[in-house]
Amino acid sequence: MATIPQLEYVVQQLRAKLPPEYELVSLPIQYGVKLLLIQAEKRAGGSLYFSKKKRCFSFVPHANGDKDISQILMDHINAMIGLRTNEIYSPANSVIRSPLPIDHGYSCWMGTDEAGKGDLFGPLVIAGFICDRTILAELYGLGIRDSKELSRQQIEKCAMILKKKYRGRNFIVTIHPVKYNKLYPNFANRGGINGILGWGHATAINHLSRKKFPLQAVIIDRFSEKDRLRQTLRIASTIKLDLRVRAESDPAVAAAAILARHNYNLARERMQETLGFIPHAGCGVEALNDLQQLFTTAPQSLSHFVKIHFAPVRRLILY
């Protein structure tokens, strides 16, 4: 029966945190793992489950175990997955956010993602991250998941650790507005912004593929045709290009997305040194107000801060 990485991580952490006089035995079962905690002649157990669909844990204790040992096991599981005491008995109520699922058979793979694509101000940032199963538990422990579920502070914390601890596994391409606006005309008939994205992703992939990792695949959020992207890559044909919708559900892509978002945030915040304010992300009303302010005070510097081909910028220039 196939093991579930999220449950492997919990069992690993339980063994590390339990006092040495306790022995934890685990046995894979359908959708979960059966746990048995032993201390001398005393023992108690339960079944821990993980739902891939709901991305949550639930725990059902066995009724015939030692009450004290059972309580110790439940307390440690509570600390691991965050269930409150009155929820741990009810699988229907256990809605704690889990680590990211792995739904492929790769043992070593790269993920890439970008930030700034739909943002009026700031650069386009593409990051890559190499993951393998030896670091999955560490990534889960850091709280790596879809960056849209993380706060600004959580993204910063995770990104700083990823950059420092996994320096050889990541690479970031930052295309600042000046360079972006020079590149865009060359890609106007080759996919536009998706063409630039392809170039940026290929740059990150080509750089990281030279590292000494046994890469089997590159997982990318679907933004381009596979054939077009493959033409710009200099990687072995044996490395699979895995283009997906909602690719951030994969931990390698999630790590890349966190790195890209963090660098985008830093670049936008640095604009305050010149502009006197931090422009808003996105392309909504607040960002449009920032654009109007910049156009009123320094129209000649638009290309240093914004993506010129965006419709709101073109309208300002034309009128």
Image: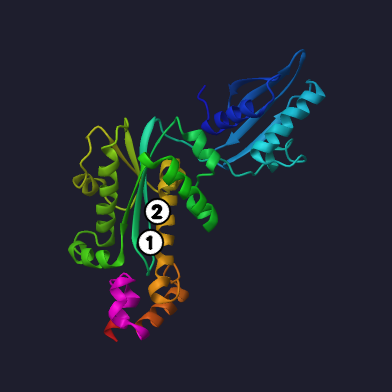
**C-alpha separation, residue under disc 2 versus residue under disc 1:** 9 Å
Residue 36 visible in image: yes
Q: Which residue is situated farthest in the top direction here?
A: 41
Q: Residue furthest right?
A: 67
Q: Measured along the vertical axis of the image, is residue 44 above or below residue 59?
A: above
- Which residue in the protein does label 1 denote? 116
Q: Is residue 3 left or right of residue 90?
A: left
Q: Secondary structure at mark 1?
A: loop
Q: Is residue 141 magenta?
A: no
Task: Determine if residue 151 is in view.
Answer: no
Rendered location of residue 41, percent (x, y): 77, 12
Residue 308 in the magenta stretch? The answer is: yes
In this picture, which residue range is highlighted in magenta? 296-316
Residue drawn at x 27%, y 67% as measured from the top left: 178
Categorize mark 2 by other alpha carbons within 10 Å: few (<14), some (14-19), many (20+): many
Q: CB of mark 2 within 8 Å of CB of mark 1?
A: yes
Q: Which residue is mark 2?
A: 260
